Image (cartoon, rainbow, N blue to C red):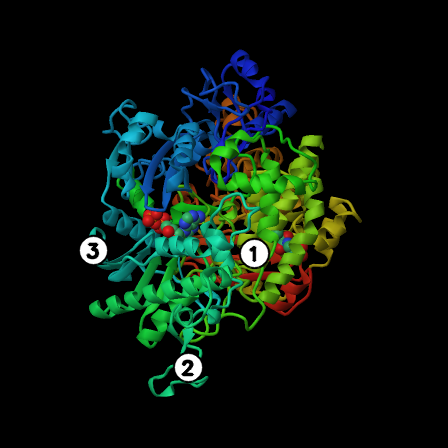
Amino acid sequence: MAGLNGDPFLGIDDNIEKLQYNNNSKEVIDKEGLVVGIGEDSSNNKNNNQGGEKDMAGNSIHRSGSRPQLDLSKAEIQGNSEERDPTILLPNQTDDISHLALDIGGSLIKLVYFSRHEDQSVDDKRKKTVKERLGISNGNRRNFPILGGRLHFVKFETSKLNECLDFISSKQLHRGRIDSHHWNSEAPANENAVIKATGGGAYKFADLFKERLGVSIDKEDEMDCLVAGANFLLKAIRHEAFTHMEGHKEFVQIDHNDLFPYLLVNIGSGVSIIKVDGDGKFQRVSGTNVGGGTYWGLGRLLTKCNRPYSSVTPLFSFDELLELSQRGDNRTIDMLVGDIYGGMDYSKIGLSASTIASSFGKAISDKKELQDYRPEDISLSLLRMISYNIGQISYLNALRFGLKRIFFGGFFIRGHAYTMDTISFAVHFWSKGEAQAMFLRHEGFLGAVGAFMSYQKHGLDDLMVHHLVERFPMGAPYTGGKIHGPPLGDLNEKASIIEFCLTNMRQFMLYSISWMEKFVLKGTEITAPVPMAPPGTTGLGGFEVPSSRGATLRSDASALNVGVLHLVPTLEVFPLLADPKMYEPNTIDLSDHKELEYWFTVLSEHLPDLVDKAVASEGGTDDAKRRGDAFARAFSAHLARLMEEPAAYGKLGLANLLELREECLREFQFLDAYRSIKQRENEASLAVLPDLLLELDHMDEETRLLTLIEGVLAANIFDWGSRACVDLYHKGTIIEIYRMSRNKMQRPWQVDDFDLFKERMLGSEGKKPRPHKRALLFVDNSGADIVLGMLPLARELLRRGTEVVLVANSLPALNDVTAMELPDIVAEAAKHCDILRRAAEAGGLLVDAMNNNTLDGSRGNSSSVPLMVVENGCGSPCIDLRQVSSELAAAAKHADLVILEGMGRALHTNFNARFKCEALKLAMVKNQRLAEKLIKGKIYDCVCRYEPAT
Ligand SMILES: Nc1ncnc2c1ncn2[C@@H]1O[C@H](COP(=O)(O)OP(=O)(O)O)[C@@H](O)[C@H]1O
Ligand SMILES: CC(C)(COP(=O)(O)O)[C@@H](O)C(=O)NCCC(=O)O
Ligand SMILES: [Mn+2]
């Protein structure tokens, strides 16, 4: 790893990576040979050295926590090796296999590329036996020829095609390996690589691609691609479409069966208007030459004389123009109805005095030269002229075909609030509220996505919402290694260089700027508010006043509105949800700003403690400290961004915030921040387990059941995510806190369905009910929670003849126990308990023990009901049951009882979830506000909610 410490780093965008190394690294690469683990893998090595701890690479659910490995053998410098940061070619890099599609438009080149990883789960014994037991052949592979991976979105200006070519070649995207095992069985071998491309540039630049990259361009029709892209995104991405009216953004849930027909308006350089009736069924019904290119081109021309001399380029960039408009007042240049009617409305035909009568109309009478107009005003006037015009033409076409829904795409929109409001306003105004304008988060990438979809048989078109997990990376080094860079903070003088670099890839490649600097820049960009116009200076005019002033314009470098799409084709909808369509995981609605503020503060205040734990988990090295610092900044920046724009990444719930924190930790390579805490608590709890079991076995059935449920609730106090609990841990030992918590268990609990549950379990009036066939126990924390709470409950179910499946996280989150850790814990517990031992053997959990015959010499008792462990598919303290692992989905098939435990899984999420089978929700509420809000109680109150099957 040392050989790569010359800042392998991220490129200009979050999604853009470039390999670099410093002068001494090549030597190391050559000598050491070959596969160098990066990112997560480097830490895995460390874990292995520490002994005993399992690495996470064995997990098949590779959310963004997993990093690709690079094969650096035969690495070679491309171009001039005297260059400071030359590009490296990695001819033998096979793991991170890429696939690329392009949309080369008049203004911008859009790239969509896919990178995937090997499934490294084959060696996991638990997985093998679980698969055998649950009868999963090979997940969903047959349906999905692709394995998991990521879909990245990147764009370049078409005039800077060379930078795009450099990018493709530095990432080797054009060498997309296509072979039978990995991608497409009928595809040709790697030579004569072909890339799919659409847009005019696919024709115009085909020769250049052949010359520079040696690849042929397979041209795809632009309209086909736009429609295919829009249809795919609308079906496969949750929260892809939204409305934007008067500054208010609202995501629209699109019903797949009710998508068509719709009108697609793609505002690129020019505008295409397409009536879409189905997949591949469409007609281009209209278009206009007044589009994004018009705004950009005319805007440049009209403002160029006012461009400050100090600027790097003589012309305003698109974003600068847009930003100017936010400070503009179009009344200085537009002729308003009031200008014509002496300040009065023309109310007879419904036009107010502030309505624009004639865009740029004032310029006819003013005795002004171009330079006398403020570029801000020109830009706003132009933006409004073009947006209204497009809105109106779109509406007229919708009217022509009786369509109610209009989706707007293309990069002219650029997520700019004011532009969207203006278009929405026009559509609303002209249609008198009959038609609705909707926007797409992947606005400009429709064509590129469509070109990507045109690769035959890659299976992507079969992907559904639940297969895609969107992540918003924040400048962490994709390529791992050490973090270099100046001390944080002292970056002002570099900012202008960086800014320049961000818009100029070629220049960028010549500067050695660590990702850390870029990260800090990004961090400040996304937290710094965009300058707003003083109230009243703009807006007036137009039909009426689109209210939002586009405070959301951010530079391309932080274009976080689209994240990297992580494809996990093995994810499934939890089959026991009563009504998946109506299911909403989040209990707490963060669209209430007060609520958002509260949780924002909770998470911010928890941050220092979390960073401490994270840094300690990595040995407290300088490198770990830097990463800890960077993590804190990254996460704070994410939070700040979300405070400003809660819907920035899609609809926001508390579960998303808590997951974002875990993802962010992983991005900075903190793979298991609570590792040693978990271990310590497991050991302490396992030591007292035999006594607890003995105690339980002396009780009658009814007392035992109550004690078991109390035990679960009491042990749920071990939660390192709760501020109040962390304070407690500083005051007592694990066992002391556990005893105290148990002593405090007094019924009735704040939510108390225990009697109902007891009746279901034990029956009444001497009638013995049928035991459950299979129970799924969604477990929560390590230590007492799993060992003294959930395991004894599992044991009781097993004793009654119920199969038990422990459902645990795929990846660590706080001190939650993971599926990977459970077999060892169960094995340890089984040493003191025959019931657990026999069940674990029957469930294939004690593979090693069985092979070694270490227990009592007998082979697994297959007549016993099995105890199994499955991973849930996520790495968060909460769970979204629309996206669970295939093994959990398989395990659910025969289950008739679901037990959800803990605040994250049973309260923050799923408190209101309804199941086809019986459900028991158990949690201690470790937060005062939540207790008040959710159960009208106080902190440390308990929830025992039992719901019969629906
Ligand atoms: N960073 C940017 N650079 C240039 N143009 C941009 C940028 N962001 C948004 N735009 C706008 O998007 C238009 C291009 O949209 P796009 O959908 O990519 O169309 P095309 O395929 O014709 O290039 C530009 O004409 C401009 O109005
Ligand atoms: C992160 C958690 C959901 C974990 O709780 P658990 O699921 O382990 O019961 C919970 O600790 C939490 O909501 N913490 C933030 C609230 C607080 O610190 O008060
Ligand atoms: Mn937890």
Q: Is residue 500 above or below residue 1?
A: below
Amino acid marked by disc 3: Phe
Q: Are marks 2 and 3 in contact (CB under 8 Å)?
A: no
Spatial CA span between label 2 and label 3 = 39 Å
Identify the residue at horizontal 47%, vertical 72% (top origin). Answer: 331
User: Is residue 902 toward the left or the right of residue 454 in the image?
Assistant: right
CA separation in Å, label 2 and label 1: 36 Å
Specify the farthest residue to the top.
31
Residue marked by disc 1? 642
Q: Secondary structure at mark 3?
A: strand
Q: What is the number of the mark on residue 282?
A: 3
Disc on res. 206: none
Going by the numbered disc 2, the residue's amino acid type is Ser
Tell me the quarter of the picture where residue 529 sits. Answer: bottom right
Nearer the N terminus, badge 3 or badge 1? 3
First of labels 2, 1 by sequence position: 2
Give percent across and percent down for residue 377: 48, 64
User: As drawn, which residue projects farthest toward the bottom?
Assistant: 348
Q: Is residue 10 above or below residue 929?
A: above
680 and 898: which is toward the camera: 680
Tag 3 and tag 1, C-beta contact below 8 Å: no
Return the residue at label 2.
352
